[in-house]
Image (spheres, rainbow, N blue to C red):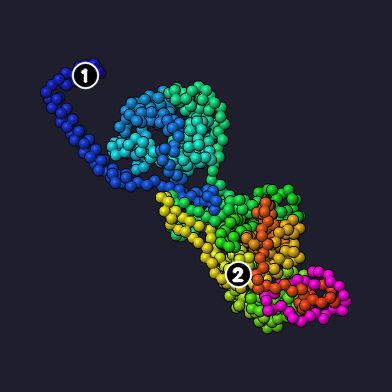
């Protein structure tokens, strides 16, 4: 085929009138089609009002009571900052890499598109992009990421529209707050916090260079994903800055030799508390607001105390695993293997509450949030065992009984309601101890005396007292209440115990203090909900009785662990050894812990409340009061102290072998003298 002859014929035909007519018609049709297409695209663009009212998705931030950021809830993790807060070196670096002619073009840069095409062709890969910052902003805000002709046309037209409406600085500010920087971070402020643990204005030159390299391929150049690629990308950007004479050779070399040290500012060491707060927020505001609305949530948590709690729980679980291994003949070294923990997944929970405000200061809901999100501190209902007994004694003391009253600890067969079946309650020690004061019975956790006391005051009254003190779960009004068989959560138990150090005042637990929207408007401001539920004198006497539990009863491990300051509490263990508890308190902090298996199997004979949750509580409190001990418990003015014989509960005489300074509500103290002993002496007890 003679191509030269064909080409000559075409050139000759182009000179004819017929060709010019055909060309004019085709050009007119094409221009009409193209104009119509542009008009259609134009009217399909977001209206100007939508541009003006656009609000990017903002992360909600959760802070502790000291203003320390502990978590963020987000779809796109973002914090808006004004352009004035963004350092010049970061702005210039991003402009050099993403859009060198930003301040001179009108939204698109044909020269940049051509240059990017040639560079990418030379390198054999996508090394540069041709889109301006305005185009990137238009695409990120309003368009899809699809690589189609129609999307590109819309992007160009929207870029012109944005350039017409906004100043260059406004466009740059929107871009720097919108751009995807990888690792869930959107915008330069969040990127600075995510990668370097600092605010954007605190960034150094090498840090700015690293961030500037992220928008092109956020996941590829993230230092969390590939530190080597991130470093190479950073150094190429530094070379570009040197070539543009924006930095000196000395600055470039120093920046290149600076190690990349990534560090997130957000702490992830209170996951169960954060999830507890998230659920409450979602109930009130809905998922869309909490994940996109940029709420600022100020909570009751104290991160310092939270850290103490987590360390105490971890140490307790490690020690419990050793006991389980030894009891079952398993080599101790195997407890560090994943298979052991899979087969023996012992769990624990812990809560600390300020009794005056109800503020939840620390919360641990399990051993590992990544393995199980079930919150054993707030969601798990378990039998409290003897840790429920203080509510029985509270009911008695608030209704005329005294700590010195005597109940005989002796066998008491009872019919269980089935024909021929007899229930024989017994103590943990499988022994009976005869006449016993209420103080002694609570101190040593005597089951039979507690059961007889329950029969005197009535299960309905005990249920009523426990409910008004903070137990919200259903309380079964039967004799098994003496053994703590009605299931409760740790949160309920610790909250109810808070009534004792607060002189009979119940304060509902609070986790969320204040919630603000993205503009700083207060949406929620929670104040302590206070209610008098118990006489101050009764609360103090129970505290005094539970001090005896710590000083000479089932929780003396606390003293053995070196704690000398004033504190009180009560242990609890269920019959089959499946749950062990301890709830204790000082004058300004109540804390409780639970240990057990989720499937309610027995913990074995080597684990008890006195050797597992008690030392966990002690380890926590020792750290809390390491620098300054708590104030002693304050005795109400209407409490009198009387010396009695601890065996008879009557006034002490010099013939009594032992004595005890007992506390009474004025008017309830004994008036009769003890006549039980013949010998002389005065041995304190």
Q: Is 360 covered by the magenta stretch?
A: no
Q: Are marks 2 and 1 in contact (CB under 8 Å)?
A: no
**Residue 285 picture quarter:** bottom left
Whether residue 82 sits left or right of residue 634 in the image: it is left
Q: Residue furthest left?
A: 17
Whole-percent x, y for residue 96 in the image: 41, 28
At x 43% / y 51%, what residue is drawn?
520
The residue tagged 2 is 504
Q: Nearer the viewer, residue 205 or 596?
A: 205
Which residue is labeled 1 in the image?
A: 6
- The residue closer to the viewer here, 531 or 100, is 531
Q: Is residue 11 left or right of residue 167?
A: left
Most common secondary structure along the magenta stretch: loop
Where 58 falls versus 86 (above or below)?
below
Residue pictured at 53% horizontal, 60% vertical: 510
Q: Quadrant of the C terminus?
A: bottom right
Q: Residue at x 68, y 83 (%)?
A: 419
Which mark's residue is nearer the viewer, 2 or 1? 2
Looking at the rendered structure, which numbered label has been put on residue 670?
none
Where is residue 135 drawn, in percent x and y?
34, 36
Badge 1 marks a residue whose secondary structure is helix
Q: Residue at x 40, y 26 (%)?
A: 120
Measured Cα–Cα span from mark 2 to mark 1: 107 Å
SS for dot 2: loop
On screen, residue 570 versus residue 108, left or right, reads: right
Q: Which residues are magenta?
A: 659-685
Q: Nearer the viewer, residue 640 or 365?
A: 640
């Amino acid at each position: 085929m003679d191509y030269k002859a064909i080409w000559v014929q075409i050139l000759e035909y182009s000179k004819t009138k017929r060709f010019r007519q055909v060309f004019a018609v085709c050009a007119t049709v094409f221009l009409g089609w193209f104009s119509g297409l542009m008009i259609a695209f134009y009217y399909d663009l977001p209206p100007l009002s939508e541009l003006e009212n656009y609000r990017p998705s903002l992360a909600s931030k959760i802070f502790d009571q000291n203003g320390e950021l502990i978590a963020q809830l987000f779809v796109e993790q973002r914090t808006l900052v004004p352009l004035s807060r963004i350092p010049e070196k970061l702005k210039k670096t991003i402009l050099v890499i993403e859009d060198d002619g930003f301040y001179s073009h009108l939204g698109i840069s044909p020269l940049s598109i051509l240059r990017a095409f040639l560079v990418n062709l030379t390198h054999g890969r996508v090394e540069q992009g041709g889109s301006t910052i305005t185009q990137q902003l238009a695409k990120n805000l309003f368009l899809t990421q699809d690589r189609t002709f129609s999307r590109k046309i819309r992007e160009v037209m929207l870029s012109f529209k944005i350039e017409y409406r906004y100043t260059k600085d406004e466009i740059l500010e929107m871009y720097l707050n919108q751009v995807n920087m990888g690792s869930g971070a959107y915008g330069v402020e969040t990127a600075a916090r995510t990668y370097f643990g600092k605010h954007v204005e605190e960034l150094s030159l090498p840090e700015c260079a690293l961030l500037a390299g992220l928008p092109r391929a956020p996941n590829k150049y993230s230092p969390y994903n590939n530190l080597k690629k991130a470093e190479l990308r950073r150094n190429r950007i530094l070379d570009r800055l040197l070539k543009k004479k924006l930095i000196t050779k000395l600055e470039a070399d120093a920046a290149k030799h600076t190690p990349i040290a990534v560090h997130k500012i957000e702490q992830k060491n209170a996951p169960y508390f954060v999830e507890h707060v998230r659920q409450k927020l979602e109930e009130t505001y809905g998922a869309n607001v909490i994940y996109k609305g940029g709420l600022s949530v100020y909570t009751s948590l104290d991160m310092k105390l939270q850290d103490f709690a987590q360390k105490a729980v971890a140490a307790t679980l490690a020690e419990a695993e050793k006991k389980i291994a030894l009891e079952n003949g398993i080599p101790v070294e195997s407890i560090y293997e994943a298979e052991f923990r899979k087969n023996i997944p012992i769990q624990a929970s812990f809560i600390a509450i300020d009794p005056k405000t109800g503020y939840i200061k620390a919360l641990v809901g399990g051993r590992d949030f990544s393995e199980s999100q079930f919150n054993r501190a707030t969601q798990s209902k378990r039998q409290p065992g003897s840790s429920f007994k203080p509510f029985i004694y509270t009911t008695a003391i608030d209704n005329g009984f005294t700590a010195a009253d005597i109940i005989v600890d002796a066998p008491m067969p009872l019919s269980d309601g089935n024909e021929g079946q007899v229930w024989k309650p017994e103590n943990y020690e499988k022994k009976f101890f005869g006449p016993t004061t209420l103080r002694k019975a609570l101190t040593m956790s005597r089951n039979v005396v507690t059961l007889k006391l329950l029969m005197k005051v009535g299960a309905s009254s005990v249920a009523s007292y426990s409910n008004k003190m903070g137990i919200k779960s259903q309380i079964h009004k039967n004799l098994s209440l003496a053994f703590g068989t009605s299931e409760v959560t740790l949160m309920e138990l610790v909250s109810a115990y808070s009534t004792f150090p607060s002189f009979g005042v119940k304060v509902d637990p609070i986790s969320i203090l204040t919630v603000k929207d993205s503009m700083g408007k207060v949406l929620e401001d929670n104040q302590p909900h206070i209610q008098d539920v118990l006489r101050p004198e009764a609360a103090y006497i129970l505290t005094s009785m539970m001090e005896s539990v710590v000083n000479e009863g089932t929780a003396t491990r606390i003293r053995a662990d070196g704690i000398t300051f004033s504190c009180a509490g009560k242990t609890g263990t269920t019959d089959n050894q499946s749950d062990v508890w301890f709830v204790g308190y000082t004058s300004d902090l109540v804390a409780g812990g639970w240990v057990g298996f989720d499937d309610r199997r027995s913990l074995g004979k080597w684990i008890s409340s006195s050797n597992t949750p008690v030392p966990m509580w002690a380890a926590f409190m020792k750290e809390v009061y390491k620098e300054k001990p708590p104030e002693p418990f304050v005795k109400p003015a209407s409490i009198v102290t009387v010396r009695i014989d601890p065996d008879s509960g009557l006034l002490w005489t010099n013939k009594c072998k032992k004595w005890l300074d007992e506390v009474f509500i004025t008017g309830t103290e004994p008036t009769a003298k003890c006549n039980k002993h013949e010998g002389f002496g005065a041995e304190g007890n």
